[in-house]
Amino acid sequence: MKRILLAACLTLVAAEAQAVSRYDPTRMSCGRVQATIASQGAVILRYQSTRVPGLPLYDRYVRDERFCDMGEVRARAYVPSADTRSCPVFICKRPEFDRHFRRRLFPHR
């Protein structure tokens, strides 16, 4: 019985660790970036920072919330592409519920 449970756990872990493709959005049009994300569900986009030369920036971009972890929501983000400086895409992030709560309890003086 222990072997079956161990095998089941290992199978679940292997299913979660699927490879995510990596792309450079500055070598693709905005439409192609969005189509790539739509077809694969989740990709990693890596590009150079415009503010700090030589600094690579990257993140995981998703098609919808099904590709986010539990407790995360889909949020709009922008990446540079070959034809525009700000191509709209989506990332996963934790919602900031306590921001207004903190502001009401501890107002700035």
Image (cartoon, rainbow, N blue to C red):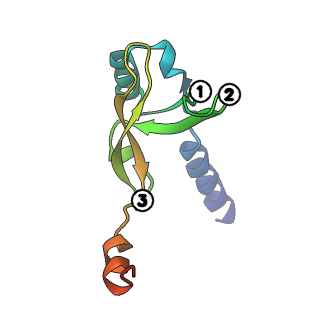
Quarter of the view holding residue 30: top left
The residue nearer to you, when weighing 35 against 76, is 76
Identify residue type, mark 3. Arg
Q: Which residue is mark 1?
A: 48
Q: Marks 2 and 1: CB-CB under 8 Å?
A: yes
Query: SS of the residue at dot 3?
Result: loop
Query: Considering the image in quadrants, where does the C terminus appear?
Result: bottom left
Calculate the distance from the C-alpha at mark 2 to the C-alpha at mark 3.
29 Å
Quarter of the picture containing the N terminus is bottom right
Mark number for residue 54? 2
Q: Is residue 9 above or below residue 88?
A: below
Please tell me which residue is depicted at 55% across the width and 32% down the height of the picture: 20
Q: Are marks 3 and 1 in contact (CB under 8 Å)?
A: no
Q: Residue at x 56, y 35 (%)?
A: 58
Label 2 vs label 3, nearer the camera? 2
Mark 2 or mark 3: whose residue is earlier in sequence: 2
Give the mark nearest the N terminus, 3 or 1.
1
- Say whether residue 14 is left or right of residue 104: right
Query: In front: 94, or 67?
Result: 94
Amino acid type at image mark 2: Gly
Residue sticking out furthest to the bottom = 105
Q: Give percent across and percent down for residue 102.
A: 38, 79
